Amino acid sequence: MALQCGIVGLPNVGKSTLFNCLSNAKAQAANFPFCTIEPNVGVITVPDERLNKLAELVNPQRIVPNTIEIVDIAGLVKGASKGEGLGNQFLGNIRNTDAIIHVLRCFDNDNVIHVDGSVDPIRDKEIIDIELQLKDLDTVNKRIQRVEKMARTGGDKDAKKTFDILSIVKENLEAGKSVRTAPIEKEDFEFIDDLTLLTAKPVLYVCNVDESAVNTGNAYVDKVKEAVKAENAEVLIISAQIESEIATLESYEERQLFLEDLGLQESGVNKLIHAAYKLLKLGTYFTAGVQEVRAWPIELGYTAPQAAGVIHTDFEKGFIRAEVIKYEDFITFGSEAAVKEAGKLSIEGKTYIVQDGDIMHFRFNV
């Protein structure tokens, strides 16, 4: 399950610095625009304390955490929707991602130039929003031209429904609002999913601040929070500069001391990874044995056979049943054998909806 979050923003807002902190990959982080030309892809480990606690009890030969992919996408400028700058490439790279991490510069520093000459996160956000909306509007108009005739004749109910939804989305875009805020039912998005509209993707706003604002935010952050209220989007405060300093520290103890000195309980990178995982609407189930304790990513709402298919498609095709232990029960009783003895292991069938934290063992026959 290779789901991707794309990091976007104007040139020189701290995207590549943040990406470097997230990933072992090294995007060039320089004080000039377009230092990232090709999208850099990093495979990011998702921190999960539950995995560590299970490993302490099971003592496996290896521990395998969840991962997600983060893509650092080249900076965008005005006119991208018409191919200006790296526009077509930029928009194409966003289209391939499942969610967007939008980095906004929320700090003053005369030594770090801004592509537009001044710091204004709301203006920066609107520049990218407008370019994505214009591209979506072009896509929607083309689809409307295709389905309008079929919708008018009334013989194709799906065409009529699609036309009505597209008309609402078009009106929303023409009002300068992203598709994700369109007044349509959640299930109606299925009619336009194949368009992979850019502003329909879930978004997380990351306010890149200086050290003085990392705990409390600042006036720039307050403006961002106010501006995105209608989008029901999370706003995360991070200092890319602090995160890059943490990344140079070799030991866990050194990193924790550094965080404590700043009055922080957790690094911004960890917060961002968890927020990205949530943004992708992912949950986790575990397999636990002496050979391996492993976290597996699932889309929330997966059935037991679908969850089994994450391990191997044969598991889903030949699914018979799932043996399920709740994480809290495993921790309380200390072992699978003790859980069974206490009658806390359940046998679940094909309709079981996997819960975040379930420990599972699948029976299958191919």
Image (cartoon, rainbow, N blue to C red):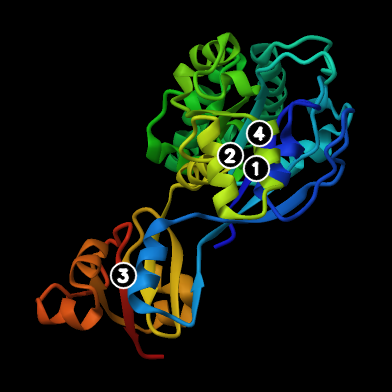
Q: Residue at x 57, y 8 (%)?
A: 219
Q: Residue at x 63, y 24 (%)?
A: 211
Is residue 268 in view from this perspective?
no
Q: Quick check: marks 2 and 1 in contact, CB under 8 Å?
A: yes
Instruction: Give the number of the mark in front: 2 or 4.
Output: 2
Which quarter of the picture shows residue 52?
bottom left
Quarter of the rendering occupied by the N terminus:
bottom right
Is residue 168 in view from this perspective?
yes
Label 2 – label 1 distance at C-alpha: 7 Å
Mark 3 sits on what residue?
359
Residue toward you, 317 or 139: 317
As drawn, the label of residue 246 is 1
Q: Position of residue 340 (x, y in %)?
A: 15, 80
Q: Residue at x 52, y 55 (%)?
A: 46
**Secondary structure found at label 3:** strand
Q: Quick check: marks 3 and 2 in contact, CB under 8 Å?
A: no
Instruction: Give the number of the mark in front: 4 or 3.
Output: 4
Label 4 – label 3 distance at C-alpha: 36 Å
Mark 4 sits on what residue?
242
User: In the image, is residue 170 above or below residue 280?
Assistant: above
Mark 2 sits on what residue?
258
Q: Position of residue 81 (x, y in %)?
A: 78, 27
